[in-house]
Image (cartoon, rainbow, N blue to C red):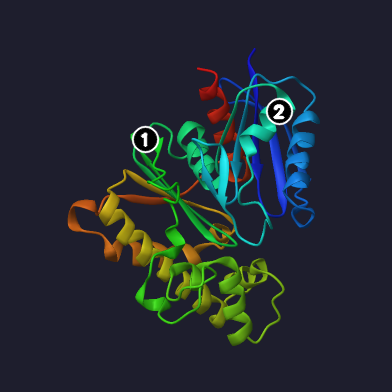
């Protein structure tokens, strides 16, 4: 039985899974990402996670945070969540460690490939996936393949300007982007400015909204509508069969999903009114499985 490793490298944790050709996830290991210790330590943590799976692998696939050039296997750019990560020759480093073929891509692209292989987009060829968490990332699958763009930067769904975010500062240095009001940190900060109840995390805001807290519902609704506006515009441009939404914020329940869908549907051109927006199915395993799919393709 051919076994490959799928790795999901994020700013706070790195997950690795042992996967066979059918997509069965046999073993999973998660370790902290030692981001503050630099790129060499991050790579070493990923190598350790795979070795702790306990079986030899025929290939390795990686979905990493940051802008990734899959052709060169190199990190093009990254946020401060992974200091110094830009420029890392990730494929080369992992090939040296394991001595097997290695495929590298962005983590949200891996997430989309996982859902298209085994999740909510199985059988679909044209899919838009958006992951809403600390930031808002996206991936567009065209005829089943990731669209990377000319510079490997395609997919930044959170950096689409929307009217409801006008003037709001974004993490990219610009203003008025959907991420500035729709990401997890933006939603939490908005509630802390407006709400009366204490909120340590977005989960607290979500719980308050479910309990009927008017400010919590208003904050989640405003962020969701901003994202819905952005997604509707992207769909008008790209014409996917399906839109999937994942990430931690997608767990905020009807107070978030209902205004998201309403704003999304309001933006769609008439021939696109049947494009469905739904949650993913694979949760935290999606990127690991998508990375494993990349590894299997590297063996062909």
- Residue 104 against residue 75 in the figure, above or below: above
Nearer-the-camera pick, 42 or 221: 42
Nearer-the-camera pick, 58 or 241: 58
Decide if residue 75 is on the left or right side of residue 53: left
> Where's residue 266, x and y in %?
28, 66
- Residue 86 against residue 286 in the figure, above or below: below
Nearer-the-camera pick, 57 or 96: 96
Residue position marked by numbered label 2 in the rendering: 96
- Please tell me whether mark 1 sits on a helix, a strand or a loop: loop
Q: Kindly identify which numbered label has been placed on residue 216.
A: none
In the picture, residue 125 is in which quadrant? top left
Q: Residue at x 49, y 35 (%)?
A: 71
Residue lying at the far left of the rendered structure = 270
- Please tell me whether mark 2 sits on a helix, a strand or a loop: helix
Residue position marked by numbered label 1 in the rendering: 124
Count up the numbered dots: 2
> Where's residue 47, x and y in %?
75, 35
Q: Residue at x 69, y 70 (%)?
A: 201
Q: Residue at x 67, y 70 (%)?
A: 204
Q: What's the CA distance linking mark 2 and mark 1?
A: 36 Å
> Where's residue 172, x and y in %?
51, 68
Decide if residue 199 is on the left or right side of residue 141: right
Category of crowding for the residue at label 2, using alpha-carbon neighbours closer than 10 angstroms: few (below 14), some (14–19), many (at least 20): few
| Residue 262 in sight from this viewpoint | no
């Amino acid at each position: 039985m051919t076994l490959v490793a799928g790795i999901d490298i994020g700013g706070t944790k790195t997950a690795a899974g042992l996967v066979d050709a059918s997509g069965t996830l046999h073993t999973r290991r998660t370790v902290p990402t030692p981001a503050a210790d630099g790129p060499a330590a991050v790579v070493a943590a990923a190598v350790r996670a795979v070795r702790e799976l306990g079986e030899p692998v025929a290939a390795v696939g990686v979905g990493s945070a940051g802008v990734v050039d899959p052709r060169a296997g190199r990190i093009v750019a990254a946020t401060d969540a992974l200091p110094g990560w830009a420029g890392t020759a990730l494929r080369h480093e992992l090939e040296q460690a394991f001595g097997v073929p290695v495929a590298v891509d962005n983590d949200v692209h891996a997430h989309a490939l996982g859902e298209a292989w085994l999740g909510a987009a199985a059988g679909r060829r044209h899919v838009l996936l958006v992951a809403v968490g600390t930031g808002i990332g996206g991936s567009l699958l065209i005829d089943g393949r990731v669209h990377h763009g000319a510079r490997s930067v395609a997919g930044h769904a959170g950096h689409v300007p929307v009217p409801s975010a006008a003037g709001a500062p974004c993490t990219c240095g610009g203003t008025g982007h959907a991420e500035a009001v729709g990401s997890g940190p933006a939603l939490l900060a908005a509630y802390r400015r407006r709400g009366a109840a204490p909120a340590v995390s977005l989960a607290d805001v979500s719980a308050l909204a479910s309990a009927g807290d008017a400010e919590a519902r208003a904050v989640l609704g405003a962020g969701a509508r901003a994202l819905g506006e952005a997604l509707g515009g992207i769909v008008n441009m790209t014409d996917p069969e399906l839109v999937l939404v994942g990430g931690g914020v997608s767990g905020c329940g009807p107070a978030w999903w209902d205004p998201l869908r309403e704003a999304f549907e309001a933006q769609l051109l008439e021939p696109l009114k049947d494009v469905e927006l739904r949650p993913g199915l694979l949760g935290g395993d999606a990127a690991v499985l998508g990375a494993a799919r990349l590894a299997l393709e590297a063996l062909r």
